[in-house]
Amino acid sequence: MPAVPVSAIDTIVADAIAQRIFPGAVVRVARDTIVLHNAAYGATTYDAPERIPVTPTTIYDIASLTKMFTATAALRLYEECLIDLEAPVGAYLPAFRAHNVTIRHLLTHTSGLDLRLSTLCRSGRDALLATVYHTLPAHPPGSRVAYTNINSLLLGEIVATVSGQPLDRAIDALICQPLGLRHTMFCPDSALLARIAPTEFDDAWRGRLVHGTVHDESAYALGGVAGHAGLFSTADDLWRFCRAWLPPTPDCAGGSFLQPETIALATTNHTSGLTLACGLGWMLDRPNFMGPAPSGSYGHTGFTGPALVIIPQHRVIIIVLSNRVHPRRSAPRHHAVTAAIVAATLDSITVRHRETLHTLA
């Protein structure tokens, strides 16, 4: 497979910056271990004097991509027979009152729990968790998909409880260290501030530009560490993470990070017949940000601007990092940018396939 045409992705991202969808971005496209496109665009802000050019190593608040790290940590504990997907949440968190919600419900966003965590951001950690534990399903578990932060928050508390260590240390031990993710962290050190893209001016609560601390209000209230948000990362680290999620093939045996059966289980549709296709943590077949990706593709997005797309049919990984909420949150037009990058990547695959057929003719 050739490198993705640079001009195509360059044009897509340049247009997005010109439209102020985001001030800058990092885009990486890879096939297995081969990087096909790796470029940084624009700056971390729109205006001087704070305007710092984006580089391939710029660190971004990855928002809800944190959910995939939490899900992965839970699945690694599942492989060790420490978590049962069919067990009720209360088996691990006795204070949780909804006895008919299972781990699988949390992973597939079918718990029926409906609670806007952002409304609790001024409560403090203990009060916020107490409210979460006393929340009952608004709909029968398993009856509908409703993407909510509470599911991953609870899953993160379970990972911490089962692993016997705080969530940040659990994710470091279960994921970051085995995969060599050196720039993925909660609560980054202030020494890294110059490398971190700022997010939003929070006039309503924090009264400042959010820079180097988590953008998500409820994760901030929880001390910056939560199952649904809080991680910061780079394109290179996310590529390494996604490579661990590619299924093995006869030509690519894969590593020992996850069992092939676990990858297959997590990337299978567990919500057939419902409105959205969900794996265990993964979003499946979502054209709003995956564009024309073939059926069986999976990925995730984050509120602040990041997106991951994995196309196992071609063993392709696409990572787009941006701080689209800077300086203020607006309509999520960044999904269309990711979809266009996916389309450009697939176009290059099609061209290469046609060239191969022509050579063989």
Image (cartoon, helix red, strand yellow):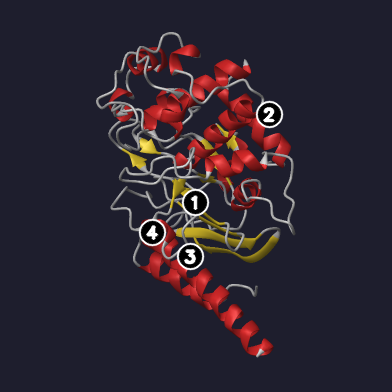
> How far is the residue under mark 4 from the one under mark 1?
10 Å
- x 59%, y 17%: residue: 162
Q: Earlier in the sequence, mark 2 or mark 4?
A: 2
Q: Earlier in the sequence, mark 3 or mark 1?
A: 1
> How far is the residue under mark 4 from the one under mark 3?
10 Å
The mark lying in front, picked from 2 and 3, is 3
Q: Quadrant of the N terminus?
A: bottom right
Q: Which residue is mark 1?
A: 298
Q: Earlier in the sequence, mark 4 or mark 1?
A: 4
Q: Look at label 3 and name its amino acid.
A: Val
Q: Which residue is mark 4?
A: 287
- How would you rate the neighbour count of disc 1 (Cα within 10 Å): few for under 14, some for 14-19, many for 20 or more? many
Marks 4/3 in contact by CB < 8 Å: the verdict is no
Q: Position of residue 237 (x, y in %)?
A: 64, 47
| Rendered position, 227 above or below 59 | above
Q: Look at label 2 and name its amino acid.
A: Ala
Q: Earlier in the sequence, mark 2 or mark 3?
A: 2
Would you say 25 lies left or right of 125 here? Answer: right
Q: SS class of the residue under badge 3?
A: helix
| Rendered position, 348 above or below 186 | below
Q: SS class of the residue under badge 2?
A: helix
The mark lying in front, picked from 4 and 3, is 4
Q: Which residue is mark 2?
A: 173
- Kindly give the residue lying farthest to the top in the view shown: 94
Q: Look at label 1 and name its amino acid.
A: Tyr
The mark lying in front, picked from 1 and 2, is 1
- How would you rate the neighbour count of disc 3 (Cα within 10 Å): few for under 14, some for 14-19, many for 20 or more? many
